[in-house]
Image (spheres, grey):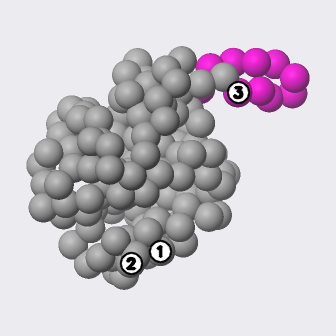
Amino acid sequence: MTDVNLQPGDRAPAFHLADQGGLKHRLSEWKGRPVLVFFYPKALTPGCTTQACGLRDLAGDIGDAVIVGISPDPPPKLAAFDDKHGLGYPLLSDPEHKIAEKYGVWGQKKLYGKAYMGIIRSAFLVDEKGKIAAAFPKISPKDTPGKLLKALNDHG
């Protein structure tokens, strides 16, 4: 686990990952636009569905900002997630959790008393210049859309 604690003003770690259709994306392709980056543990699970659909539902309220989800899931599973819920934004595959580690969201979790490594649900607003404008570690699925929208409005 990397103990990264990204703060507003820090440069957002770059990424180059495949989306649900196999297309590769870089953070830099959205330079000049705010990017709402959220990390979630597993596609097609209840909490992740709540979070992803909440962000989908605010897409019409965020102007030219981009929504990007990142999880360890492979592209075919991400495609099924997108198809089932009509998400309509890039879902990026980070199977070796290299980007999650750069953002400090890969860590120890517990389920039924067992410890394991996984994604710690978190969200970030990256500004037009590629810097962290807001960071939300350990965010709840229900809070993600509202907190990101507020951060975007406060930033803009």
Residue 72 got which mark?
none
Q: Amino acid at mark 3?
A: Lys
Instruction: Give the SS element for disc 1.
Output: helix
Q: Is residue 50 or residue 140 the one in the foreground?
A: 140
From this view, report whether residue 139 is shown above or below residue 150. above
Residue at the disc numbered 2: 153
Are the two marked residues, 1 and 2, in contact with CB atoms closer than 8 angstroms?
A: yes
Residue at the disc numbered 3: 109
* Start-end of magenta stretch: 109-118
Of mark 3 and mark 2, the one earlier in the sequence is 3
Q: Position of residue 126 (x, y in %)?
A: 31, 54
Q: Residues within 10 Å of mark 2 (few under 14, many from 20)?
A: few
Q: CA distance from mark 3 to mark 1?
A: 28 Å
Foreground label between 3 and 1: 1
Residue at the disc numbered 1: 150
Residue drawn at x 40%, y 76% as measured from the top left: 154
Is residue 11 one of those drawn in magenta?
A: no
